[in-house]
Image (spheres, grey):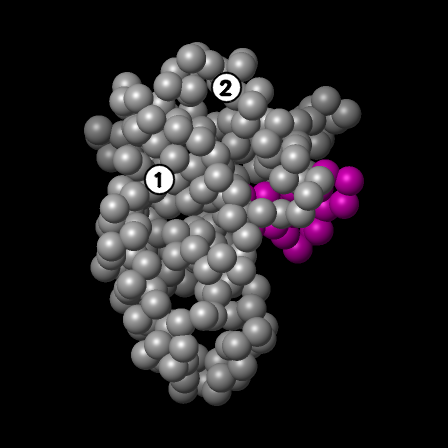
Amino acid sequence: MKTLFLDESGDHNLSVIDPAYPLFVLGGVIMEADYAQEVLTPAIADFKRRLFGRDDLVLHTADITRNRNGFERLKDTGFRAEFYDQLNALVRSLEFSVLACAIRKDAHLARYGMAALDPYLMSLDILVERFCMDVGDIEDGGLIVAERRGPTLDHELELAWLNLKIQGTRYMQAKQVERRIQSLNLKSKAANVAGLQLADLVVTPIGRQVLGKPVKDDYAIVESKFRRSPHGRIEGYGLMVLPK
């Protein structure tokens, strides 16, 4: 069974748009469920033990960037360089594909006004559709795991998932979504799910690249992992940037 682990970068709120980051990215990593359990999970735990002497830390970009919640040692320049060298080497070595949708919130709001769809729910439709295509016509061939975001947002997400199974998407009928995707599971950050942490590490470099910010080594790794068409095309297959 294939699993899509989802995470986000930026705020889905259209009422307040940060001019420094006017973007919302929903993205994640696709891998076989057995691989996630037997290879990814122990590899990430081993990485944490080697660098921090413990494996209960949760790799979270915001905490890593701000040297907090167990990542205080990253204030040391030498240790920080070693951390990123080893992290990049780990991510490069793993087998997964990347799927993401980036929405330029200012342009989205300017185009659609009051009719503008919530960026998270809009992105979810697109990613579920592409994931269904990736899974193929296999009953219960896919599983989606997303991070909990609080009771209200979790409820909205569950309703959106139910709607996808009733209405389908632009290119995927409802019965196909229900047949191919076994379920959408929500997990807390405290659950220390390796797949969700990998997804977290992937979405931020995508956001930086879409906004035209300086590209770091991590984006080159992410780019090499994007889901592609048979001819190697990323746009529309592994990365969707809206509005077009």
Residue 92 lies in the magenta stretch: no
- In the picture, residue 236 is in which quadrant? top left
Residue 3's label in the rendered image is 1
Q: Is residue 63 placed above or below 219 in the rendered structure?
A: below
Q: Nearer the viewer, residue 213 or 73?
A: 73
Q: Main secondary structure of the magenta part?
A: loop
Q: Which comes before the other along the chain, label 1 or label 2?
A: 1
Where residue 78 appears, as percent x and y from the top left, is 40, 86
Where residue 118 appears, as percent x and y from the top left, is 66, 32
Residue 72's label in the rendered image is none
Residue marked by disc 2:
165
- Magenta stretch bounds: 9-25
- Image quadrant holding the N terminus, namely top left
Q: Is residue 145 left or right of residue 30?
A: right
Where residue 228 appears, as percent x and y from the top left, is 29, 35
Q: Residue at x 35, y 40 (%)?
A: 3
